[in-house]
Amino acid sequence: MNFNFGHFFRFTVGMVFATGLSVQAAEGPAPIPVAVAESELFEVVGRLEDDGFVFYIDRADSNAPVLAATLEVESAGKPAKAVFRAERGDYLIADAEWLKPLRQPGEYPLAFTVIAGEESDLLTADFMVTAKPADAAAGPGLGRAGWWLALPGLLAAALIWRRAQKGGKA
């Protein structure tokens, strides 16, 4: 059998290129949207999750958690009060109507009012929600596992084609 390195090289490069494209098409899930606001007194970090907007408040100078404070968040002129959850040490806004616009892709300015004992502060943050990627199964490409399963079939097809080119001789 006469081995042609050029054919093998082109075939291998084509497979690697095709696999690379399918891996790029199947990106992971979109990141969880996060809002971060800082002032001289407080740091507020909020994550938009399935159950609502969850916030953590810390002291800016020590990173110590601020517990049982009052937190109000305003978006598009509509305020919402966060409920402190002592068992988790966080604050939650679960108002579905208030959250609805924030679940859509876009950039949203947020204003936070924090009152902790005798201290209070007003903080702002830009909250960015990116579009969710299309389902990997609906996208182009087989994915990495698909190519590993298809590779033996492609190699067999290449060998059959090669044999046919030589007139059936080995």
Image: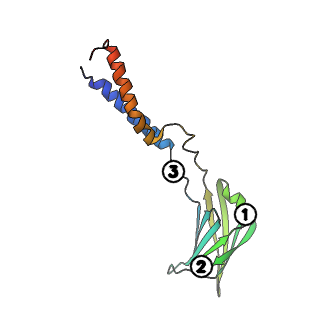
Of label 1 and label 3, which has the lower sequence position? 3
- Identity of the residue drawn at 55% across and 80% down: 65
- Identity of the residue drawn at 61% across and 80% down: 86
Quadrant occupied by the C terminus = top left
Q: Position of residue 92 (x, y in %)?
A: 65, 71
User: Can you say whether 145 is above or below 108 in the image?
Assistant: above
Q: From this viewpoint, is residue 116 visible?
A: yes
Residue identified by numbered label 2:
87
- Identity of the residue drawn at 38% across and 36% down: 16
Q: Which of marks 1 and 2 is in front?
A: 2
- Report helix, strand or loop for mark 2: loop
Of label 3 and label 2, which has the lower sequence position? 3
Q: Nearer the viewer, residue 153 or 58?
A: 153
Question: Which amino acid type is marked by label 1?
Answer: Ala
Residue identified by numbered label 3:
28
Quadrant occupied by the N terminus = top left
Q: From this viewpoint, is residue 39 visible?
A: no
Q: Nearer the viewer, residue 60 or 138?
A: 138
Residue identified by numbered label 1:
96
- Identity of the residue drawn at 60% across and 82% down: 67
Mark 2 crowd level (few <14, some 14–19, many ≥20, 10 Å Cα): few
Of label 1 and label 2, which has the lower sequence position? 2
